[in-house]
Image (cartoon, helix red, strand yellow):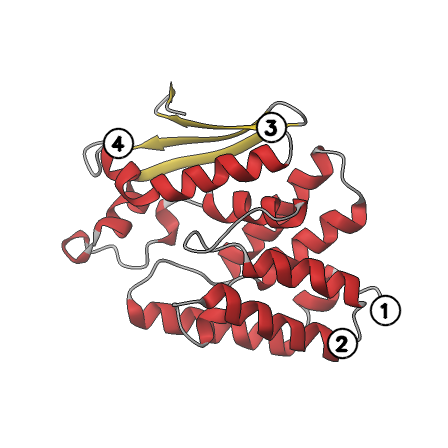
Amino acid sequence: MKITFEDIKNNKTVQTYIEKADESLTALGYTEHSFAHVSKVAALASSILKEFGYTEREAELARIAGYLHDIGNVINRIDHAQSGAVMAFRILDNMGAEPEDIATIITAIGNHDESTAFPVNAVAAALILADKTDVRYTRVRSKDQTTFDIHDRVNYSVKESSVSFKKGEHITLDIKIDTNECAVMDYFEIFLNRMILCRKAAAKLGAEFRLVINDQPIM
């Protein structure tokens, strides 16, 4: 059976796991990881693969992986990529998905967290890029800046964020930071490993990863 993105999006089990995973992260003080985040990641991962000449099916698998990638947070933030991959396997298997599609999706999910991630295939690369470039002030839950940790402060400082890409050339994250709220070096303190991972993911797709902050090329 060819599982579609709409099948996954409308699945009640999936919806529950996303909701409960985000509840756990709320309790732990993390930024938003609910439907806004996973929907954005799913759409961008799919769009990247389409632009880079991959098949519609590969793009749809990237979209599915993007939507499911954070469900492991319902168990624990630690190793959530691996637990999420196992959970996704059970969901997809119960839905009758083809083993090859399941393998592609869970491989991408299991390789998206920067502590253990690697762009082992095109779907994993697209998921990494879509996930790690979702930096924006709307992901910060509290507006009380006295309670911010450095992750909140960095995300809250990003007033504009966009990702552009062109086959065979580049994938560019362009952000505008309010330097009154966060220094550019603070961004690197938190996100350097993510940007290095994005560079590897872009290279997997035959492109260069670029980071532009306040109109200045950084990498």
N-terminal label among 4 and 2: 2
Q: Is residue 196 above or below residue 102?
A: above
N-terminal label among 3 and 2: 2
> Which of the 4 quarters of the picture holds residue 65?
bottom right
Residue 157 relative to residue 55: left or right:
left
**View extreme (right): residue:** 1
Q: Where is residue 139 in the image (x, y as percent from the top left)?
A: 38, 53
Q: Residue 207 carries which label?
A: 3
Q: Is residue 157 above or below residue 76?
A: above
Instruction: Calculate the distance from the C-alpha at mark 3 to the C-alpha at mark 4.
Output: 25 Å
Q: What element carries label 1?
A: loop
Q: What element carries label 4?
A: helix
Q: Mark 2 points at which residue?
A: 95
Instruction: Calculate the distance from the C-alpha at mark 1 to the C-alpha at mark 4.
Output: 48 Å
Q: In this view, does 129 lie above or below 53?
A: below
Callouts 3 and 4 close, C-beta under 8 Å: no
Q: Mark 1 points at which residue?
A: 1
Mark 3: which amino acid?
Ala
Residue 86 relative to residue 81: left or right:
right
Mark 4: which amino acid?
Val
Mark 1: which amino acid?
Met
Mark 2: which amino acid?
Met
Q: Which mark is residue 184?
A: 4
Callouts 1 and 2 close, C-beta under 8 Å: yes
> For the residue carrying disc 4, how many other residues have a C-alpha within 10 Å: few (<14), some (14-19), or many (20+)?
some
